[in-house]
Amino acid sequence: MSQDLAAETAARIEQLKKERDAVVLAHYYVPAEVQAVADYVGDSFALAKLAVDLPQKVLVIAGVEFMGESMKLLNPAKTVLMPEPAAGCPMAHMVREQTIADARATYGDDVAVVCYVNSTAHAKSLSDVCVTSSNAVPVVRALPQHHILFIPDQNLGRYVAEQVPQKHIILNDGCCPFHNAIAAGEVASLKETHPAAKVLAHPECTREVLELADCIGSTAEIIAYAAESAADEFIVVTMEGVAAELARRCGAGKRFWFVHDSSCPEMDKITLERVRACLEDMSGAVELPDEATCTRAAAALARMLEVSGR
């Protein structure tokens, strides 16, 4: 898209937001031009908290499918629009109901099913509490149960287990294929090339990658670390979409390197034109499953906000 057309599209989006009483919430991983027209940019935890208290009647979620579902679960009376309904999260579907049933049968009341928000509404409905990468450790630590089935991401679950050794963490066979594909060897190679750089890694990465990190944290925590650090060089081990916010927060004095091909192809599907189109015709409205599933899933999300001290 040319600069002139992008500016024209952005101006139309601003006009439509006023006409529709709409607000645009964008994840850090979507393209920079989409982040630029958003009213709020954040990770899934920050956006989930924001959505509950926003006054607008229409929420436009520039993110993947599970984010739209979560926003609708927390705001059932509002219209929630997805600019690209086909943008999904492979990990969200990596949960088997039988895995949950087996854990409950084995451990009874002393097991809590902890569900990463990168999951379907159905998976959330089978869980006791939801978490994000920002709050997984304190939420798990605060739960009374000793046994924790962590779904769907085994990498984040393994990281939580290392931070909360007093709990028995049961891992699920699931992962973010994009973070999981980041090779420790490539991170090590970047460290050799940039020996003064701090390594900032998302806990959805493998253990081998995390062992190389100076900072392990959510996307928001990675950004905050870079902004506050005295260092001026960073190797960023997460999706490259975060580069726009890093540049905005850190300015020109700091430099960032990403591993090869570390973009999220699902987030990349969300474009300025799709944001404009969904506001033009109110398309991409999020629809939820049956009422019982929604009630249980919303309760798991609400408990996340309660336990994490929203």
Image (tube, grey):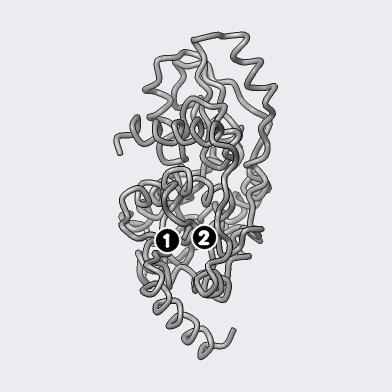
Q: Earlier in the sequence, mark 1 or mark 2?
A: 1
Tell me which amino acid carries mark 1. Val
Task: Measure the C-alpha gap from mark 1 to mark 2.
Answer: 7 Å
What residue sits 42% from the left and 41% below the top?
134
What residue sits 62% from the left and 58% below the top?
85
Density class for disc 1 (Cα within 10 Å; few <14, some 14-19, many ≥20) is many
Residue furthest bottom as drawn: 4
Tell me which amino acid carries mark 2. Leu
SS of the residue at dot 1?
strand
Q: Quadrant of the N terminus?
A: bottom right
Q: Position of residue 176 (x, y in %)?
A: 63, 44
Density class for disc 2 (Cα within 10 Å; few <14, some 14-19, many ≥20) is many
SS of the residue at dot 2?
strand
Out of 177 and 201, give the one closest to the viewer: 177
Q: Position of residue 175 (x, y in %)?
A: 64, 39
- Establish if 136 lies above or below 27: above
Specify the label residue 81 is tagged with: 2
Q: Quadrant of the C terminus?
A: top left
Q: Which residue is mark 1?
A: 58
What residue sits 67% from the left and 46% below the top?
90
- Establish if 179 lies above or below 18: above
Q: Position of residue 203 (x, y in %)?
A: 52, 40
217 sits to left or right of 104: left
Check if mark 1's residue and mark 2's residue have beta carbons within 8 Å.
yes
Specify the label residue 229 is tagged with: none
Out of 257 and 69, give the one closest to the viewer: 69
